Image (cartoon, grey):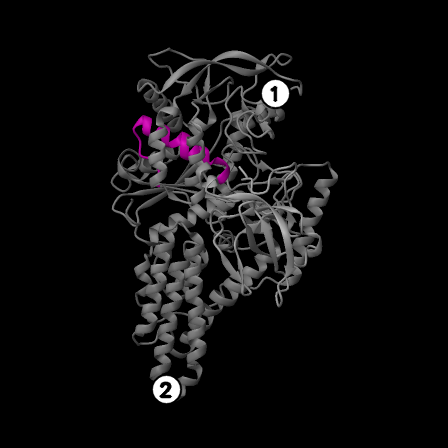
Amino acid sequence: MSNDFPTETPAVVTCGLPYANGDLHIGHLRGYIGADAFNRALETLGQQSAYVCGSDMHGTPVAVNAEQEGVDPEDFALEWHEQYEETFPQFNVEFDNYGHTHDETNTELTQDIVRTLDEEGYIYEKEIQVAYDPEADQYLPDRYVEGTCPYCGAKARGDECDEGCQRHLEPGEVEDPTSTITGNPAEYRDRTHKFFEVSEFADYLTEFLDGLEGTSNARNQPRQWIEDGLQDWCITRDMDWGIDYPETDSDGESDLVLYVWVDAPIEYISSTKQYSERVGTEEYDWEQVWRDDGEIVHVIGRDIIQHHTIFWPAMLEGAGYTAPRGVAATGFITINGKGLSTSRNRAIWAKEYLEEGFHPDLLRYYLTTTGGLQQDVDFSWDAFQEKVNGELVGTVGNFWYRSLLFAYRNYEGTPEADVSEAVRERIEGAIGDVRESVNDYSTRGVGQAAVQLAQFGNEYIQRNEPWKLTDENPEEAAQVIRDCVQIAKAVGVLLEPIVPDKAQGLWEQLGEEGEIADAHLEDALEAPPRTFDEPGELFAKIEDDRVAELNEKLEARVEAASDDGDADEETESDDTAADESTSMADTDDLEPLLEDRIGFKDFQDLDIRVGRIEDAEGIEGADDLARLEVDIGFETRQVVAGIKQLHDLEELPGQKCVLLANMEPAELFGVESNGMILAAGDEADLLTTHDDAAIGEKIR
């Protein structure tokens, strides 16, 4: 078990590389802002840390789009890379280093790591079937081929089932292949490629996952892949754009390039190395992080968990590098309750948000504190307005302004009094909450700790009414305002990782020197300057007519895009390292899938039986509950179900149902329920069997 942050060893925080292939939207920004906030929070704990990333320049999507535009892939990708470099700072996302996968550092380091894996015996050659387009006379790697997923039957692209089970797919696995170049059926031809022997790392990866920190989806989802048996990983492709497979002693020069998912994560190391070379190893030593005992944390989209918890740690272990301490996988972003769709222009684009004149910290706050990291987050302008007006304007901003203004007008700054013990203890409690949240990988918890402290401050000033005390009891009035100024400073220090620019504004209003970003949690209890100038309001209310205007613009864009053709729904993750989106069809009204997966053994622990309803009657005094008698073969169970208003109870006797038999008994409205009948949707559509399964038969 790792020690809690802060530790004596340096940390590095990374985020899944943005694919240099298109505009950024808030689905992407969620990850980069979240990782930035987490890195800042680590630093407030006193943890030495660096935040690094880079643009993913390689892979077939870049090659395909560059070809369509008639430009060189490198020029195409570099243009997007430069745009990202300009965009991220506009959202206060501050990378210590931001590189790209095609630069010299990453090229050399990637080839060096592959050589090491080859020398250690983890790479071998194998003849496989690769999709080929006879008309175009070329092999079809990855996104040049589409077809059917062999595992779930969904539509799939060459290296990923992105509309179904989200499995990584090896060359030759896609069924019924079609060329995206000509639209014609493709054929499979034999071709020799290089494979990384991931299967050799099964025991190591199981142990790695046992100790992995971060979100539960990143820990649990990969276990099923290990239980199913790891497949070795084809790490080369038949194309020109990418990093050349290095010349090795085993086979000499190769005409293949490395698969994009080989060099993309290595950019994490390369970018850290570039940062270290720029500031000097005495200030930050990249080798201590990546070759020794550093604290490595990856913030990624949930659609690339397999790459970061199976392939990547196996590569690191095989090449003698440090494994990640934590992997935090974020959920998707929806817009107005529907899947984010770039094809339908149902998205909030990064440049659009800025052009609307909103401060970046408002979006940072919304994205980092609405739900936990791994939950899906819905964005609407109405919800954005409610959260900003209620929490930032009404709670934080209101407290900052009223407390500092009162202090300025009555004391020209911080009153000469000591902080009361009760307020000191409350601030210390908030500091403890932030520490706990950081170690739980919860940016939401960090933000909540700060806002709840501001709420306490509002209640404290309202309860003590210092405006009445200034004449009646000036000493007590000074004590109350001294407490309030200290709380205001503490809220700023705690909230800095989430809203850094606004927190700096408070810092300057307090007359503090330097940057609040350099402050540690303990500074929340340090006395503010004795004098400061008249404060201003740091947050402004978002008006209803502004939101109505924004909603109209979004609806008009979506309608215009829809008129151009029928596009598939998409729900997009926070990064685009493998692709820009994960498509979904007709799921706008469905609840999102749960992140956490269970193993087959967990499923076997569920005793689900075919039952037959023998009797059904409403429970007196309960609007929705009904008491059922259900025969499950061995015995008849009494079950309480919330179906009173949804079914004609007189028609239920004799109907088959499906019952969870080993559910713990519970008492509802004085009636014991000994099991749970299963139903689908808000209308409680009772599950049943298609043919003549016997009563009491177990569901397998």
Farthest residue, direction bottom: 472
The reply to whether residue 289 is visible in this rendering is yes
x%, y% of residue 54? 44, 36
Which residue occupies the foreground of this view, 351 or 684? 684
Q: Which residues are magenta?
A: 302-325
Q: Is residue 237 above or below residue 522?
A: above
The reply to whether residue 93 is visible in this rendering is no
Per the model, the C-alpha gap separating discs 1 and 2 is 83 Å
Residue beneath label 1, please? 177
Dot 1 alpha-carbon crowd within 10 angstroms: few under 14, some 14 to 19, many 20 or more: many
Is 315 included in the stretch rendered in magenta?
A: yes
Kind of residue indicated by mark 1:
Pro
x%, y% of residue 488? 40, 67
Q: Main secondary structure of the magenta part?
A: helix
| Label 1: which secondary element | strand
| Label 2: which secondary element | loop
Residue beneath label 2, please? 473
Which residue is located at x 44 percent, y 79 percent? 463
Kind of residue indicated by mark 2:
Asn
x%, y% of residue 60? 54, 25
Which residue occupies the foreground of this view, 87 or 112? 112
Quadrant of residue 449 within the rendered picture: bottom left
Dot 2 alpha-carbon crowd within 10 angstroms: few under 14, some 14 to 19, many 20 or more: few
Quadrant of residue 246 within the rendered picture: top left
Quadrant of residue 189 within the rendered picture: top right
